[in-house]
């Protein structure tokens, strides 16, 4: 079984809809991240959480919110989706006790906002 | 100026060629220099890393860091079709909470 799972894998939604992307991990890591990947722009950090009570904004958090329900679960919400949020979204985890702090990525969610 | 710059490619080479992938960075505080490999429709996976300057070799792959010129490279010898993927450089430093700063990725295709 995969260590980092994301659901759904593909999603089509309409402008203005609220959607949630979910991430679960079995690696036992405290740190979790949400990224989006766009052609020519690479991976950009949306939000990150170093433990259940710690949530931090990344470089492109506007229009997004997150919830850390447990050590193993980290959800990303788009409150009112817009077309320029069409992208590939990745969840990742990391273990800071083992340098370098390798990040382990899920398989991604492909989101299309019409 | 972006903290990490990477030529996006695409780069197409024949099987057996030597491939050179490169990134430049601007923040001299960076300490860890990583290369992630991303196959189509998959998440990135760590390929290899170096700490500070110097070279590190792992099979057909060599990672090189030149901190004086803020330049990092990944060399692939005897490239294979299975090496076809997007390669992302990633850099971090302890003072930055070990968060990774990624390059945009270089798409590589190794053709038979």
Image: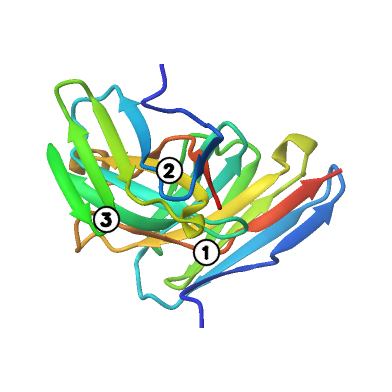
Rendered residue at 84%/52% (across/down)? A13
Residues behind callouts 3 and 1 on a single chain = yes
Q: Which mark is residue A16?
A: none
Which label sits on residue B88?
A: 2
Q: Which residue is mark 1?
A: A106
Residue that label 3 marks: A101
Which colour style is shown?
rainbow
Q: Chain of mark 2?
A: B
Q: Looking at the picture, do discs 1 and 2 lie on one chain?
A: no
Label 1 marks a residue whose chain is A
Mark earlier in primary sequence (3, 1) = 3
Tell me how far mark 2 sits from mark 3, CA to CA: 16 Å
Horizontal arrangement in the rendering, residue A68 relative to residue A7 (left or right): left
For marks 3 and 1, give the CA distance.
16 Å
The location of residue A36, given as percent across then percent down, is 58, 45
**Position of residue A83 measured from the top left corner of the image (x, y, whole percent):** 79, 37
Crowding near the residue tagged with mark 1, few <14, some 14–19, many ≥20 C-alpha atoms within 10 Å: many
Q: Position of residue B79 (x, y in %)?
A: 41, 51
* Other-residue count near label 2 (Cα within 10 Å), few / some / many at <14 / 14–19 / ≥20: many
């Amino acid at each position: 079984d995969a260590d980092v799972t994301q659901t759904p894998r593909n999603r089509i939604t309409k402008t203005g809809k609220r959607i949630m992307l979910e991430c679960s991990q079995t690696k036992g890591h405290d740190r979790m991240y949400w990224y989006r990947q766009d052609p020519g722009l690479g991976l950009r950090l949306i939000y990150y959480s170093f433990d259940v009570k710690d949530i931090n904004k990344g470089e492109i958090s506007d229009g997004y919110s997150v919830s850390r329900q447990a050590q193993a679960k980290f959800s990303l919400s788009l409150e009112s989706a817009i077309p320029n949020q069409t992208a590939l979204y990745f969840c990742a985890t990391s273990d800071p006790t083992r340098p370098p702090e390798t990040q382990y990525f899920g398989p991604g969610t492909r989101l299309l906002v019409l | 100026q972006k903290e990490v710059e990477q030529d996006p490619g695409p780069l197409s080479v024949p099987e057996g060629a030597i491939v050179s992938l490169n990134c430049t960075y601007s923040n001299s505080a960076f300490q860890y220099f990583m290369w992630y490999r991303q196959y189509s429709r998959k998440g990135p996976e760590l390929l290899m890393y170096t700490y500070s300057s110097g070279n590190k070799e792992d099979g057909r792959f060599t990672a090189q860091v030149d901190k004086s010129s803020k330049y990092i490279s990944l060399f692939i010898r005897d490239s294979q079709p299975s090496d076809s993927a997007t390669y992302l450089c990633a850099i971090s430093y302890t003072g930055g909470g070990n968060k990774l700063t990624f390059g945009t990725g270089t798409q590589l295709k190794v053709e038979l």
